[in-house]
Image (cartoon, rainbow, N blue to C red):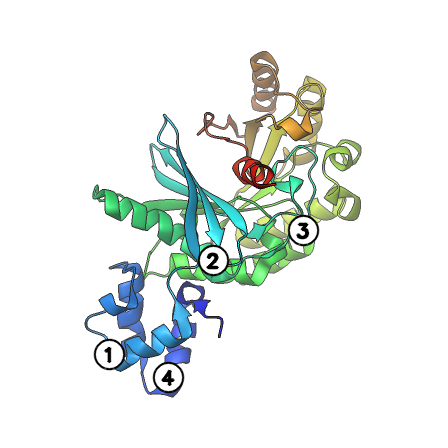
Amino acid sequence: MNKESIYGLTFEQLEAWLLPYGYKKFWAQRVWDWLYRKRVTEFDAMTDVKPECVELLKEHFVLHTLTEHVKQESHDGTIKFLFKLTDGNLIETVMMRHKFGLSVCVTTQVGCNIGCSFCASGLLKKTRDLSSGEIVEQIMNVQHALDEAGNGEKVSHIVVMGIGEPFDNFENMMNFLKVVIDQKGLEIAARHITVSTSGLADKIYEFTDTKIPVNLAISLHAPNNELRTQIMKINRAIPLEKLMAAVDYYLENTNRRITFEYILLKGVNDRVEDALELAELIGHKKQYVNLIPYNPVDEHGQYQRSTPEAIMAFYDTLKKKGLNCVVRQEHGTDIDAACGQLRSKQIQKAQ
């Protein structure tokens, strides 16, 4: 029997699973507390849970489906993990240090089918979705590493921006969110979590309707359909008109600000004219623009990093048009900073 990760269960699902075996909510709460407050790494460490209940959990679930394959630490404190899954696939997780706390970027799929032409994650096609347990376990593995360091540090923020398209793995991603924001467990504030999508409009509507107060980011990267289709093939199926209609639905029904991510590619989308067109497209929306200096990827040699002068001209143009924007602070530039880059290199090495 292939055992599932216990981290894939929300509290309500754990409670419902235990009930037919005669264990009421009280016992579910105790197990939950051991998992997320005391953060045990073995079921046998749950000392105030009935031994019969512990054996039942061991029979059906596991605590470890990820093993550390490679760990890279940057001079700025960023740590990049390459985890191996039970089927041998590799995924990346990154912990970043900020003034406001510790942020973890999680992966939702093995590979990616969105096919953005500038992205290292898309070099290897999607193999499968991650289970909700495999996504939660990325957070738990980082937290366990922090616990072992003994400094009392705790993961405070999450960005769902790793390998894959989160909204293409919607159900498992939503279960993950419910687990990590649960106030009886990790208790990571929903306002400290951001989910990024390349623009799956139908899922933006569905995400909005869940009313879960998690932040939404759109990987935009171009101010018009022609250019966006050139660098992001998803725009052929979901052009900006459809995407912006979904964005408006989100804004109208949540009253939250939305983040637009914009990777600056030299001579492609980083001109002042592009900035003016971007301001025209989103300037009237309740927005926040995250300008991202490009991390070059060997396999995508057609793209180069924008010059500092071009980045500042783009930024200044948006600010003058009244947009809220920032140039993203870079983390881990010395450890294969581009998302998917470490995984791609390891697979190529193995071949």
Which callout, 3 or 4, points at the residue further toward the start of the chain? 4
Give the amino acid at mark 2.
Glu
Q: In this view, does 195 lie to the left or right of 230?
A: left
Contact, mark 4 vs mark 2 (Cβ under 8 Å)? no
What is the CA distance from the residue labelled 1 to the residue labelled 2?
Answer: 26 Å
Which callout, 3 or 2, points at the residue further toward the start of the chain? 2
Q: What element carries label 4?
A: helix
Which callout, 1 or 2, points at the residue further toward the start of the chain? 1
Instruction: Name the one closer to the observer, 93 or 342.
Output: 342
Can you say whether 107 is above or below 273 in the image? below
Give the amino acid at mark 3.
Leu
Residue 107 in percent (x, y) is at 52, 48
Which residue is depicted at the point 54% across and 39% down?
A: 346
Of the 4 image quadrants, the one containing the C terminus is: top right
Q: What element carries label 2?
A: helix
What residue is shown with label 1?
A: 51
Can you say whether 255 is above or below 281 in the image? below
What is the CA distance from the residue labelled 1 to the residue labelled 4?
Answer: 16 Å
Residue 21 in percent (x, y) is at 36, 86
Q: Is mark 1 on a helix, strand or loop?
A: helix
What is the CA distance from the residue labelled 4 to the residue labelled 2?
Answer: 24 Å
What residue is shown with label 2?
A: 134
Residue 157, by quadrant, is top left
Determine if residue 184 is in view.
no
- Are there few (<14), some (14-19), or many (20+) residues within 10 Å of tag 1? few
Contact, mark 1 vs mark 2 (Cβ under 8 Å)? no
Which residue is depicted at the point 47% across and 55% down?
A: 135
Q: Is mark 3 on a helix, strand or loop?
A: loop
